[in-house]
Image: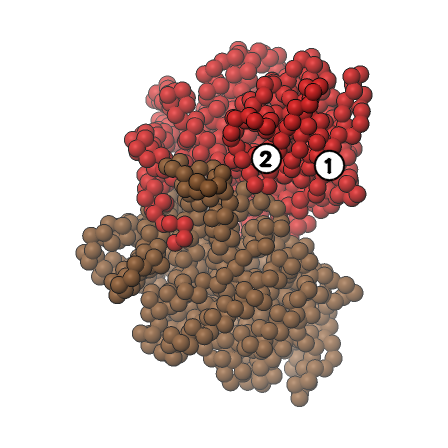
Chain colours: A brown, B red
Amino acid sequence: MPIYSAPVKDIKFILQNVLKIHDSDIPGYGELDNEYLNAILEEASKISSEVLAPLNAIGDKHGCSFENGIVYTPPGFKEAFDQLKDGGWTGIDCDIKFGGQGLPYLISIAVGEMFASANMALGMYHGLTHGAYSAIYSHGSEEQKEKYLPNLVNCTWTGTMNLTEPHCGTDLGMMRTKASRKPDGTFQISGQKIFISAGDHDLAENIIHLVLAKIPNGPDGVKGISLFIVPKFLVNEDGSLGERNQVSVGKIEQKMGIHGNATCVMNYDEATGYLVGEEHKGMRAMFTMMNEARLGVGLQGLSQAELAYQNALAYAKDRLQGRDITGVQNPDELADPIIVHPDVRRNLMDQKCFSEGSRALILWGASIIDKANRNTDSEAEGLIGLLTPVIKGFLTDKGFDMTIQAQQIYGGHGYIEEWGMSQFARDARIAMIYEGANGIQALDLVGRKLPQNQGRNMIAFLTILKTYLSENQNKSDEFDKIFLEPMKSATDDLEGAVLYFMDKGIKNPNEALAGSYDFMHLFGYVCLGLMWCKIAQASHAAINLSSDHDDFHQSKISTGQYFMERQLPFTRLHLARIRAGSSAVMKLSASNF
Amino acid sequence: MPIYSAPVKDIKFILQNVLKIHDSDIPGYGELDNEYLNAILEEASKISSEVLAPLNAIGDKHGCSFENGIVYTPPGFKEAFDQLKDGGWTGIDCDIKFGGQGLPYLISIAVGEMFASANMALGMYHGLTHGAYSAIYSHGSEEQKEKYLPNLVNCTWTGTMNLTEPHCGTDLGMMRTKASRKPDGTFQISGQKIFISAGDHDLAENIIHLVLAKIPNGPDGVKGISLFIVPKFLVNEDGSLGERNQVSVGKIEQKMGIHGNATCVMNYDEATGYLVGEEHKGMRAMFTMMNEARLGVGLQGLSQAELAYQNALAYAKDRLQGRDITGVQNPDELADPIIVHPDVRRNLMDQKCFSEGSRALILWGASIIDKANRNTDSEAEGLIGLLTPVIKGFLTDKGFDMTIQAQQIYGGHGYIEEWGMSQFARDARIAMIYEGANGIQALDLVGRKLPQNQGRNMIAFLTILKTYLSENQNKSDEFDKIFLEPMKSATDDLEGAVLYFMDKGIKNPNEALAGSYDFMHLFGYVCLGLMWCKIAQASHAAINLSSDHDDFHQSKISTGQYFMERQLPFTRLHLARIRAGSSAVMKLSASNF
């Protein structure tokens, strides 16, 4: 039976010591004193371990079922979902006007990590509802907000996002779903949408589908796409549920993982829909939610890596096999625990430095979103726009890799379903694909975010790095050597890649795009490097304040050293691949592959 | 429906143009003329596509079942297995004395790739039988050979390998299965074995289990292990089947993949067993088969990568999404095929250069095994001993990675089981674990093979590289620049790692072991680099001989260039990680992780 114990101490350490949220001027951060923060995180931890985690394997094994047009979630999901609703966990950062808790987005991410580790498939039902909330909150009319938001905030109703069609995923300009205006101002929506997570289920009274569709005779391509609310049950004027809308489930997909979440084919057959925002501005509405949604998927990468790591670590301490080559550690037994072996440690340290560094990165990202939204800070908005594809693409790629490494610790047992490691890997795999496959994240990063605002966002990020390096050097020889020197080298690699793209990409965009995936990873390592420098500094500071032997913070410094020595050198590799250019990538004609 | 088309042209190119088998002095190679080779490969290709591949998804979906003590394979497996038997495919390289075809091992590997791509789970039933054949062939008595081998060669009976127990996998010294000698010279075998692939099934009349067990009062640890034949049905003097032996299936495992192969818990309850070879020399008997078995698993890494690549390539040519940034390629449609996009190509080229390079490596490895066995060449034996953990560990790690990259090409469809990409990844995952998990391969490489014969095997391999480099330089500026220069740099990295281990590892073995996994990968990239140099040379030679525009060989050269530019730089990364040493790896106490 897999274990999960929420890393509350680590989360608090990042929030308080690394991000220093109590010093922040972001509205709402000042109220997050130690006691309040503790209460939230401890309670979320309890629900994660006691309610959500025990259902994780059950959800995987049973999956969802589809009988006579009705979708059923796995046993226990409804009761657990109700507990999340009743505890107010579904609206942590939603507007208090609509029943939310009004807390910073940062807190919803801190809690979200725990929920996603404990049960990723279950967490998606309210995660997607939050997406629908955000879309209507940002772009809906006052009437729509009042009609839909309170029930979405408390998850009496849930939400979905309907973008993909069988013949179009990334390229939404090819969309065929039609929205015909009716005389009463509503629309008739017709078409088929696929891969709709939480598309139907038995957890909520109603489901509010947000559907992208084309109004006939609008502009071609993505410029002709509009966004609609299409409720499963129409909502009467008084807020009560009315008749069933013409939307139905075609089938549910058999997937590699996240079996507990129903992935539906949705058929819209002249269903009644309500325009959100302006006609033909649907893509813009989707884009405003995207940073948040993509950060949430990056979080899933971390969450599965953390879950897998916790189990692998426990197994490595418990499993007796072989002897420490430098001397017997466990003389009373026939063998030592496998954590004594250098290569097992190498594997575990890869995982540990990923999880802890990523947690810092994602919480930093969430704080930038808060800054952008709560301080209406356009620089913060530019910065998070730049970081979002990195957080989504890099953390889900590496997060998946870490679940595979964790599975490897178990040897043969890792391949047997009952031990749970297979599920973590299978669940983690989707995060590399949905909400924009990682190749698309790389394209967004290099093709769109890098040149955005005449490159100002990238320059701002490089400035953050360089300012950090210059302000922190010469304080300690050891810190300079172990942390700042490799960080400076990695920063040079990042800048080298940007200069390469500027030089070559202008003449031939393929020169830049052929290196886009490597750039995303190079960027990701640099981000984690910065996080580890800051974690090490915060740890040194905490050690200096404490008179005890402080294993927690000492361990952070050692883990940081491991990251700088063993992971950060990846930047040089990615730069070499980028500088190889597009020639060998583009040379073959399709028929000569 | 996934596709598979055996890469016959590629296999022939490696055998004839790169390895130049017609020039070899290895007995049996001279007979492999073009016509004969063609006939074998074309026929194997036909069975692969027509018989085995159509059952691959069926095997995954149905899996094996276990009812009333009997194991059933998926629908169609028995008929396909019979076709393999009837065609003589199960004994390609077995001794003609026992009904085999007596062909070189090289040919069984060439054919094995196709069978493993087409249906890995089904291929394991005869693959393991081959392992049992080899064990008895090398270590059994004449009587045992005559009794068991003919039926194993033609797979009327199949075989298994029983090593692992619940509490011991890698560390076989902890084994508890007992073998008590009976007055008649046979043994009573009692104990439980787990993870027994093909442990029971309905494909064969009898199953010959090869079981490691301890004879009481023997030496401690692995030195007290002996090898036994334990048939499912005892075999009478006249060769007919006798009574059922006391061996039974406890359960079959629910696994991440290879669902079509029954992985059994086997219970031995005073079962009758027959000693193979000498008492307490069981491990030695297992070790002699290990190079071959591990090469076979490395082959599975390639086979799933190739299968996934073929499907991803077809999808990338077919799926219309987005436009070529340098100009519309497909004006009659709303979008271009995704193979126009640089990052899709980067992904496909990673896969292509892996599959083609690995095929050369594994066939080269098989030819070294033939040289060792057929020429009783001890240098060849030393060399393949060194290369085996690299081929097993590196090709299965990267092979799995390539199935994940191939799956990514499909976007959301890659995650849906019906498209097949999930199965390829799930099946490929086991190859990193069984036949010695890849961490153990790295340990074997650095802890055992590197220092073996006073390091002579490693020196011999470095000499192969350096001789190649010096003999081939200055023939063509372009070849020097694109191929030899990076190859020289990678060779330096490999030598640098060896020197680091020699310098540091003697004082502290953890310094070497902490870098063992990176060394295995560094070594793997160097091997593929050498293969790509040779492929490029063979292609140049073929182009020079031909007057046609030769796309096949031109494509090889471009793919080689891609490998040298984009993959070979990994050697520098791994060297950096190795040189980081063991300090940060070993620093944390287990409780501080």
Mark 2 falls within which chain? B
Q: From the top left corner, tell me how far across and down residue A511 is, in percent.
A: 41, 47
**Badge 2 is on which residue?**
B176
User: What type is the residue that disc 2 sits on?
Assistant: Arg
Q: Residue at x 42, y 68 (%)?
A: A366
Q: Circle 1 sits in a helix, a strand or a loop, which is it?
A: strand
Q: Which of the image's four quarters has the N terminus of chain B?
A: top right
Mark 1 falls within which chain? B
- Vertical arrangement, residue A83 with respect to residue B356, above or below: below
Which quarter of the figure has residue A281?
A: bottom right
Report the Cα–Cα distance between label 2 and label 1.
18 Å
Q: Residue at x 37, y 56 (%)?
A: A528
Which quarter of the figure has residue A122?
A: bottom right
Q: Is residue A393 left or right of residue B261?
A: left
| Disc 2 residue crowd, few under 14, some 14–19, many 20+, Cα 10 Å | many
Which of discs 2 and 1 lies nearer the camera? The answer is 2
Mark 2 or 1, nearer chain start: 2
Q: Circle 2 sits in a helix, a strand or a loop, which is it?
A: loop
**Badge 1 is on which residue?**
B248
Q: Residue at x 68, y 68 (%)?
A: A201
